[in-house]
Image (cartoon, rainbow, N blue to C red):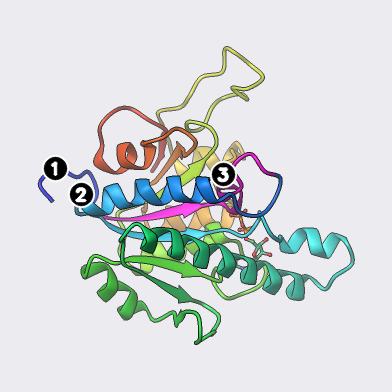
Amino acid sequence: PTRSLRYKRVLLKLSGEALMGDGKYGIHPPTLTRIASEVKEVVEAGVELAVVIGGGNIFRGVAGATEGMDRASADYMGMLATCINSMAMQDALEKQGVFTRVLSAIKMEQIAEPYIRRRAVRHLEKGRVVIFAAGTGNPYFTTDTAASLRAMEINAEVILKATKVDGVYNADPKKDSTAKRYRSLTYMDVLRQNLNVMDSTAISLCMDNKLPIVVFDLTARGNIGRAVLGNGDIGTVVG
Ligand code: UDP
């Protein structure tokens, strides 16, 4: 831990889709391995890192509900999907020698520890990567909200919100070549302009507790390190 770190304790939010690679659903093992190797780098640099993974690559509650399922049941299925992703990430990290613990908001003792805040903090202090599974444990929430909540609970200094574009733009950079990236935005900008950062519940929670969010591009190799270690101008900071 000699390099200068911008942040000492961070929460990394990955969407389920981040694990798909170029696929349309599920998990793409080489992508998982690549993300795990980047996580390993920052952990070895001395950063305490917690991860929240979504489930959208497997199941989304809203999608189930539109097809006639009870929304709460569908949401619980979505939460289970995040557990599958969390276990996959744990496996990928441990293959690379990174110690991890999965802490689940829904009890499933054979595969994950129950979520206990003080235990999560202790794991982080010991240098283990903590993976928070099952979102908040409540239907009608998202894993973005879970990320905000857990980040607050563990006193993370920042949420690193991984996306497929390098931050927030004033237009879609894939369609409009004049689109400009915002270097920084306020929470209110995001809420008022309905910018696609995280859902409004998650943004509000961050706003009320002054927790900054860095939106960055996970598809470019090395960006987790750049976001955490603070070299280079990447992404958009919401604060
Ligand atoms: N979910 C939930 N409560 C939570 C977190 C997640 O009900 O606290 C459900 C919800 O149905 C959601 C699904 O789990 O659609 C998967 O999570 P999310 O859509 O946030 O995943 P992502 O978009 O990040 O892949």
Pinpoint residue 57: horizontal percent, then vertical percent: 66, 54
Q: Is residue 16 magenta?
A: yes
Q: Secondary structure at mark 1?
A: loop
Pinpoint residue 40: horizontal percent, then vertical percent: 31, 52
Q: Secondary structure at mark 2?
A: loop
- Of tags 2 and 3, the one toward the viewer is 2
Q: Amino acid at mark 3?
A: Leu
**Residue 114 sits above or below residue 204 on the image:** below
Q: How many marks?
A: 3
Q: Nearer the viewer, residue 181 or 112?
A: 112
Badge 1 crowding class, 10 Å Cα cut-off, few under 14, some 14 to 19, many 20 or more, is few
**Residues tagged 1 and 2 counted as in contact (Cβ below 8 A):** yes
**Residue 167 sits above or below residue 150 on the image:** above
What distance separates the C-alpha of mark 1 from that of mark 2? Answer: 7 Å
**Residues tagged 2 and 3 counted as in contact (Cβ below 8 A):** no
Which circle's residue, 1 or 3, is located before the other in the chain? Answer: 1
Which residue position is annotated with label 2?
Answer: 45
Q: Residue at x 51, y 45 (%)?
A: 31
Span colored in magenta: 9-23
Q: Secondary structure at mark 3?
A: helix
Q: Residue at x 42, y 33 (%)?
A: 235
Q: Which mark is residue 191?
A: 3
